[in-house]
Amino acid sequence: MKVVLLPGDGIGKEISKSVKRVSEALKCDIDFMEYEAGADYYEKSGKLMEEGLLEKVEECGLLLKGPTATPVGTGFRSINVQLRQHFKTYANVRPIVSLEGVASRYENVDLIVIRENSEDLYTGEEYMKDENTAIALKTITAQASERIIRFAFEYALKNKRHKVTCVHKANIMKLTDGMFLKIFKNISEEYKQIESDSVIIDALCMKLVTAPEDFDVLVAPNLYGDIISDLCAGLIGGLGFAPSVNVGDQVRIYEAVHGSAPDIAGKNIANPSALLMAFEMLLRDSGYEEKADLLDRSLKELIKEGK
């Protein structure tokens, strides 16, 4: 099996080496094709990504990526957003599971965040109305909403989950979020075997930090999904244990969702768990169930030991 590997910036290069070592130990027979992209590559080449990266990902359909840095307020747009938009990976799936051995205020958290990936405020449609007024356009379409909501229910069916919750702000955003919620209610009628409900985004944030065990699968528009993904990661000890996959019709992008941590880069102290968990998701989705199970058990045993 061929997989494009994008180490990214900062600690990405170190944790990517960990994945290759683990893959060899598992005897996965994976051909990792390594490319560069991100802030480090931009600094030395003046380009955002290495030539041939997009074509190679399109060819094999699988990309495993480490963290890439993005300038704040100025400079180039996020590599993550560009890759998702280019390959039309419309669904972002983030499992959030408590791990024994990780210090956390919560136990028995087991939920899935499914985030719409293609539109909302992340289209980057902004303009200056005048020198003192910046406006960003929030785009929600029926097509993208139906696609992600149906994906969430199908995911719940396939993975034996019991409830899907719609995240929205339809009390204020009556047209955009209102449409998302209406489509959710319509589609939920087709999946009577799965419980469904809806929660306003601000109320959800409060409920997640008081009773996260009440939730199973959360489906949300892009911005809300981004925010609650990180919030939920905090419930289980941080982004160091938060893997992710971006799913499209032709391409799947697996990644660690934490940052590039330039302050500890090169010190060989970065925790590779999140990227290894993303690699486990890649193995499982590609039919390598036994190897994925072995990796999962091994990680949990080491984490339980406090290593």
Image: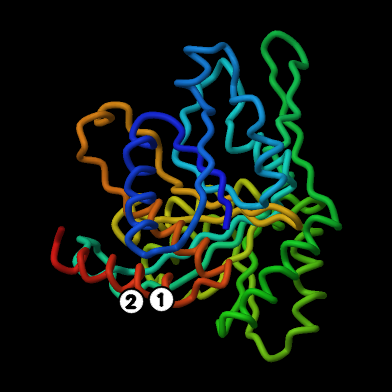
* Left or right relative to 181: residue 23: left
Which residue: 22% across, 71% down?
A: 301
Amino acid identity at mark 2: Asn
Amino acid identity at mark 1: Glu
Earlier residue among tags 1 and 2: 2
- Foreground pick, 281 / 291: 291
Q: Which residue is mark 1?
A: 213
Q: Quadrant of the N terminus?
A: bottom right
* Left or right relative to 203: residue 236: left
- Residue 83 placement (x, y as % from top left): 65, 38
Q: For the residues marked 1 and 2, what is the alpha-carbon distance in whole angstroms?
A: 7 Å
For the residues labelled 1 and 2, say whether their Cβ atoms are less than 8 Å apart: yes
- Is disc 1 surrounded by few (<14), some (14 to 19) or many (20+) residues within 10 Å? some
Q: Quadrant of the C terminus?
A: bottom left
Which residue: 63% across, 37% down?
A: 81
Q: How many marks?
A: 2
- Residue 22 placement (x, y as % from top left): 34, 57
Residue 169 visible to an observer of this rendering: no
* Residue sitting at the far bottom: 193
19 up-or-down from 162: above or below = above
Q: Quadrant of residue 297?
A: bottom left
Q: Quadrant of residue 119?
A: top right
Q: Quadrant of residue 76?
A: top right
Q: Nearer the viewer, mark 1 or mark 2?
A: 2
Q: Which residue is mark 2?
A: 108
